[in-house]
Image: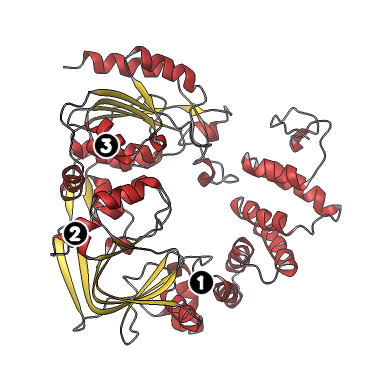
């Protein structure tokens, strides 16, 4: 079977070739191509033919119908999926039930769907607790208690940094228009304050990248615990048999809501917290550090370089007692961690910890994403050809050791890259380095724009176009379509207008 994503293809809206036929594989292919309406069309043909007893198809359709805000369809798929696999975690089916009941005003039924799911999958609730708290309060459920940090003799709050205002990004870009996520940073930005809480005789319950922090007598610090349902997870682990237990003198937490091995979060958000704890007299080489599973080579390399020898990965199950625990409030309270805003205490720590090598060669760098399958440049050959003529070297960051990456960026005069974690390395660039970040027109975050601005780099974004479609929904940040969710564009590939790249090269060449 071949898949054709052209509306003029045989079978019309189905987008199937002549030899194709409606099938589970077709629905999956359409979903992965983000042709959600076509996926629904194929699925409904299967449904009316009676071929709907595939659990994973129903599971996927719950996600598709929910993304299209067609909750009646999601509801029916959810019911059938749960009937077929009642013991499966069923994230999307239960989430579909919750949203359907909320839409219909059936609050008790929505809460029931929420509570049923957390019994089998407490580490990954179907909805944020803040969203469900109003319903829990209405029915008098204890999970609705207000979360706050208690004032008790076992805790000390260390106020390390006041809220601060940092400069705005320059409105100087190449292409059609800035992605919406960058526009708000054309004005000055306020970095949040930084507090570290010290707890004596603390208990840390670790469960599948969730952390519950409590006192020795089981008082739970809900504002510090890194999960949505600390009480549920705490009780769930207490009910398990043969849980590993350990006692340590001093423990520090760098885990947050982003446990995946992503260089941006690990380097800028998590590792910089070691500096906060060092300011309170805790050497990372002498403490137990609790963080994300170090499955990527760069994580092990960074930790080793910083002298961390006692590291506990939070992807397992463990109960730890610490005579002294230090945890930054930024682990849970905010996505906007100061390092991504370019706070000098954080960036300065990284630059000092990974110094430049004497006699290293200056570099013009293009970071290729040829090692991944998403958010790539479709005409990368032309981009590389043009940059090589201007003296650029192409690197694939994942193919280099972390210290090799630091050496390249410490001596980089120019950096070009698609929006991605590899740009975290600009934290090591010398002041004045030229940075061009390439965006899909509908997706991007502010992290590297603001970081570059505070580091004194010459930063500019370039907006490409969607690599597959000319549809305005994929190419115009201001185009709205209520039937298509904006969240479905993060992995789209990008086409770069070489003329825009040329213009940037000309501009930086002639700047004084």
Which image quarter is the C terminus in?
A: top left
Does residue 241 appear anywhere in the picture? yes
The tag earlier along the polypeptide, 2 or 3, is: 2
Q: Nearer the viewer, residue 238 or 168?
A: 238
Q: Is residue 178 left or right of residue 108?
A: left
- Quarter residue 146 falls in: bottom left
Q: CA–CA distance between discs 1 and 2?
A: 30 Å
Residue at left offset 21%, top offset 42%: 354
Identify the disc placed on residue 406: 3
Q: Position of residue 78 (x, y in %)?
A: 68, 63
- Quarter residue 425 falls in: top left
Residue at left offset 54%, top offset 65%: 126
The tag earlier along the polypeptide, 1 or 2, is: 1
Q: Is residue 389 above or below residue 300?
A: above
Report the mark closest to the observer, 1 or 3. Answer: 3
Give the residue pinned by disc 2.
Answer: 276
Give the residue pinned by disc 1.
Answer: 122
Report the mark closest to the observer, 2 or 3. Answer: 3
């Amino acid at each position: 079977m071949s898949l054709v994503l052209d509306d003029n293809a045989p079978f019309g809206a189905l987008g199937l070739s002549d030899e194709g036929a409606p099938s589970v594989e077709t629905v999956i292919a359409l979903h992965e191509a983000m042709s959600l309406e076509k996926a629904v069309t194929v699925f409904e043909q299967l449904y009316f033919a009676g071929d709907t007893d595939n659990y994973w198809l129903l599971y996927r359709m719950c996600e598709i119908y929910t993304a299209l805000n067609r909750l009646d369809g999601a509801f029916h798929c959810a019911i059938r999926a749960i009937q077929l696999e009642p013991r499966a975690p069923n994230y999307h089916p239960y989430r579909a039930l919750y949203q359907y009941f909320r839409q219909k005003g059936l609050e008790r039924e929505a809460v029931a769907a929420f509570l049923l799911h957390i019994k089998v999958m407490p580490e990954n609730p179907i909805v944020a607790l803040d969203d469900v708290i109003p319903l829990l309060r209405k029915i008098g459920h204890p999970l609705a208690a207000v979360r706050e940090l208690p004032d008790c003799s076992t805790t000390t709050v260390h106020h390390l940094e006041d809220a601060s205002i940092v400069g705005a990004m320059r409105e100087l870009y190449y292409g059609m228009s800035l992605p919406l996520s960058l526009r708000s940073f054309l004005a000055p930005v306020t970095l949040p304050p930084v507090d570290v809480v010290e707890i004596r005789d603390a208990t840390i319950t670790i469960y599948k990248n969730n952390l519950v922090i409590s006192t020795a007598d089981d008082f739970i610090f809900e504002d510090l615990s890194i999960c949505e349902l600390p009480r549920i997870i705490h009780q769930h682990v207490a009910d398990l048999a043969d849980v590993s237990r350990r006692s340590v003198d001093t423990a520090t937490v760098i885990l947050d809501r982003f446990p995946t091995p992503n260089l941006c979060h690990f380097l800028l958000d998590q590792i910089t917290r070691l500096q906060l704890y060092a300011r309170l007299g805790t050497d990372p080489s002498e403490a137990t550090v609790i963080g994300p599973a170090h499955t990527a080579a760069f994580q092990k390399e960074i930790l080793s370089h910083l002298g961390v020898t006692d590291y506990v990965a939070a992807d397992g199950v463990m109960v730890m007692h610490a005579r002294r625990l230090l945890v930054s409030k930024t682990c849970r309270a905010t996505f906007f961690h100061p390092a991504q805003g370019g706070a000098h205490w954080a960036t300065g720590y990284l630059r000092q910890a990974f110094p430049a090598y004497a006699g290293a060669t200056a570099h013009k760098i293009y970071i290729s994403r040829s090692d991944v399958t998403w958010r790539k440049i479709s005409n990368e050959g032309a981009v590389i050809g043009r940059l090589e003529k201007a003296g650029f070297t192409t690197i694939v960051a994942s193919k280099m050791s972390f210290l090799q990456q630091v050496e390249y960026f410490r001596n980089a005069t120019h950096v070009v890259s698609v929006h991605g974690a590899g740009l975290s390395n600009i934290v090591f660039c010398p002041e004045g380095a030229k940075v061009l970040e390439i965006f899909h027109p509908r997706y991007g975050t502010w992290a590297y724009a603001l970081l570059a601005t505070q580091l004194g780099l010459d930063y500019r974004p370039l907006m490409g176009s969607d690599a597959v479609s000319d549809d305005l929904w994929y190419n115009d940040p201001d185009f709205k379509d209520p039937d298509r969710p904006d969240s479905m564009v993060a992995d789209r590939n990008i086409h770069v207008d070489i003329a825009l790249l040329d213009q940037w090269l000309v501009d930086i060449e002639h700047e004084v």
